[in-house]
Image (spheres, rainbow, N blue to C red):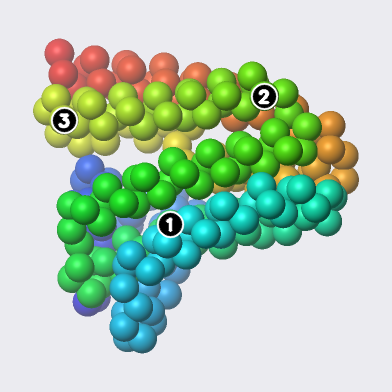
Amino acid sequence: MTWDEYCAAWSGLHGGFDPRRASPLVRGWVLLAYKIGFFLTEKRVKPIAVTLAGVILCLAVPLAALAGRPGYAAGALLVLLASMADGLDGAVAVISNRVTLTGFVYDSVADRIGEAAWLAAFWAIGAPGWLVVVAGALSWLHEYIRARATAAGMPDIGVVTVGERPARVSIAVTALLLSALWPILIIPAVAVWILLQMIGLGQLTFAVRKALR
């Protein structure tokens, strides 16, 4: 499968969003996923194996946080590796022609489990439980609204908001790294997570209303 063929297939799975027209960061990440996914496909690695690896890495994050400051930094690395797995399972599925509806569901569930694990690590570090719950609820609502809008007939993803999963990954990695230096910074990090989700919900709600009007 060529790069252009992969982009066309990837776009079809992401609401028509063409990675070739994305920002250099997004385009570079999709290209990297394509190259690594091609390698894994040649090694006969299945998409579900990559998905499960990502979940296991995420579940290890709160365990690492319990180890104290050195564990916080290790948790940041685990989040990065898990986010790579999150992109690679889809790449392997596309390249190996193993794209299925069940795989799409598994990937979405794995994302929610992973984010819950990151937030649990925030709580273990010292973030107030109610703040962590609010952050998780807003993230869940963000994804739920888009899923319901798609089911109701929205033809694409609606809009790429500031609260998408890449933003959550960035906040999780940054929060864990900063906490290794000053644990108190975990609280403003969760606050930033909440702020971006609230802005993203506003963007998404506007786009959904426009698309389904």
User: Vertical placement of 66 versus 92: above or below?
Assistant: above
Q: Nearer the viewer, residue 53 or 186?
A: 53
Q: Is residue 142 visible?
A: yes
Dividing the picture into quadrants, the one containing residue 155 is top left
Q: Residue at x 24, y 66 (%)?
A: 94
Image location (x, y in percent) of residue 12: 19, 52
Q: Residue at x 47, y 65 (%)?
A: 53
Q: Is residue 38 visible?
A: no
* Image quarter of the C terminus: top left
Image location (x, y in percent) of residue 38: 34, 78
Q: Residue at x 57, y 43 (%)?
A: 117
Position of 150 with respect to 65 (left or right) is left
Position of 90 with respect to 120 (left or right) is left
Whole-angstrom CA distance, mark 1 to mark 2, is: 27 Å
The residue that label 3 is drawn on is 151
Looking at the image, tell me whether mark 1 or mark 2 is earlier in sequence order.
1
Between marks 1 and 2 in the image, the one whose residue lies nearer the viewer: 2
Q: Residue at x 56, y 59 (%)?
A: 57
Whole-angstrom CA distance, mark 2 to mark 3, is: 33 Å
Looking at the image, tell me whether mark 1 or mark 3 is earlier in sequence order.
1
User: Vertical placement of 65 versus 52: above or below?
Assistant: above
Mark 2 is surrounded, within 10 Å at the Cα level, by few (under 14), some (14 to 19) or many (20 or more) other residues, namely some
Dividing the picture into quadrants, the one containing residue 92 is bottom left
Circle 2: residue type? Gly
Q: Nearer the viewer, residue 62 or 199?
A: 62
* Image quarter of the N terminus: bottom left
Circle 3: residue type? Ala
The residue that label 2 is drawn on is 129
Image location (x, y in percent) of residue 41: 32, 79
Please, which residue is most extreme toward the right here?
181
The residue that label 1 is drawn on is 86
